[in-house]
């Protein structure tokens, strides 16, 4: 009788020992000790200060394109470039003084005028968010003032208070959604170039169509010049 009890005791102890070993191994597997990464970057308070400084530079200049566009608009409107040289054209001034190409200079002016118009109309409706960079406003400059308001309103509705991208504005203008992932056009530069040219032609056709809708008695040289400048920006 005593011998049987001793045998059971030994067996139980052995089983418990095995169970303890399994639990210990399982514990190590479930809760491994995190290994220290040799490539971990440690940032200092100086790094934090540097980041804040650079972000303040970006934040303070995020709308610089509007200021430049406004300045160029004033100079062009009053031919102020002739102060230094009576024979100097605005295009020559932009190129010689600032290194701006003709298309870029007019794009900045158009961007300023577009945002100015949007603010004048939509601020009265409580809108406080407007194009923040030249890429966002560029698609809108090819539209009439009324269409600009309509397109930007559509962008704000889609954004729902979130971030706005140039692709969202482009979609509101063209009506074509931005496709996600890599497309065939992205893989073949010739397809992408052909699509870009087709898009330009459709935009030009739309501009001409809008111009033809204007009553004959309201058509003038200023409207024609504005149309030609927009077409020239698309072609360049």
Image: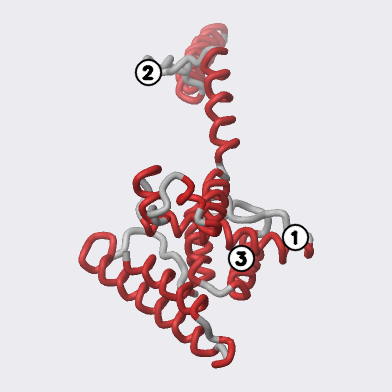
Please tell me which of labels 1 and 2 falls first in the chain.
2
Residue at the image point whose x is 24% and y is 69% from the top: 191
Q: Is residue 220 above or below residue 139?
A: below
* Rendered location of residue 25, percent (x, y): 45, 19
Name the residue carrying label 3.
152
Please tell me which of labels 2 and 3 falls first in the chain.
2
Name the residue carrying label 2.
39
For the question of whether residue 21 can be seen, the reply is no
Residue at the image point whose x is 49% and y is 79% from the top: 221
* Rendered location of residue 145, percent (x, y): 60, 72
Residue at the image point whose x is 59% and y is 30% from the top: 56
Name the residue carrying label 1.
123
* Rendered location of residue 12, percent (x, y): 53, 15
* Rendered location of residue 44, percent (x, y): 53, 12
Q: Nearer the viewer, mark 3 or mark 1?
A: 1
Specify whether 208 is left or right of 119.
Answer: left
Do the residues under discs 1 and 2 have CB atoms within 8 angstroms?
no
Q: CA distance from mark 3 to mark 1?
A: 12 Å
For the question of whether residue 89 can be seen, the reply is yes
Q: Quadrant of the C terminus?
A: bottom left
The local crowd at label 2, few if under 14, some if 14 to 19, many if 20 or more residues have their Cα within 10 Å, is few
Q: CA distance from mark 2 to mark 3?
A: 45 Å
């Amino acid at each position: 009788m005593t011998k049987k009890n001793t045998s059971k005791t030994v067996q139980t102890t052995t089983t418990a020992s095995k169970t303890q070993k399994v639990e210990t191994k399982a514990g190590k597997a479930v809760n491994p000790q995190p290994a220290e990464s040799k490539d971990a970057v440690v940032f200092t308070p100086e790094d934090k200060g540097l980041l804040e400084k650079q972000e303040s530079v970006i934040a303070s200049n995020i709308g610089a394109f509007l200021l430049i566009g406004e300045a160029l608009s004033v100079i062009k409107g009053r031919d102020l470039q002739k102060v230094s040289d009576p024979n100097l054209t605005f295009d020559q001034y932009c190129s010689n003084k600032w290194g701006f190409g003709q298309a870029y200079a007019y794009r900045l002016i158009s961007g300023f005028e577009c945002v100015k118009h949007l603010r004048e109309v939509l601020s009265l409706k409580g809108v406080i968010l407007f194009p923040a960079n030249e890429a966002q406003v560029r698609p809108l400059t090819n539209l009439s003032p009324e269409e600009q308001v309509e397109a930007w309103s559509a962008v704000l509705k889609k954004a729902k208070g979130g971030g706005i991208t140039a692709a969202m504005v482009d979609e509101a203008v063209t009506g074509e959604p931005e496709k996600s992932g890599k497309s065939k056009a992205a893989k073949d530069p010739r397809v992408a170039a052909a699509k870009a040219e087709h898009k330009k032609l459709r935009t030009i056709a739309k501009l001409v169509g809008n111009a033809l809708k204007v009553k004959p008695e309201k058509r003038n040289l200023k409207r024609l010049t504005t149309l030609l400048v927009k077409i020239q920006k698309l072609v360049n």
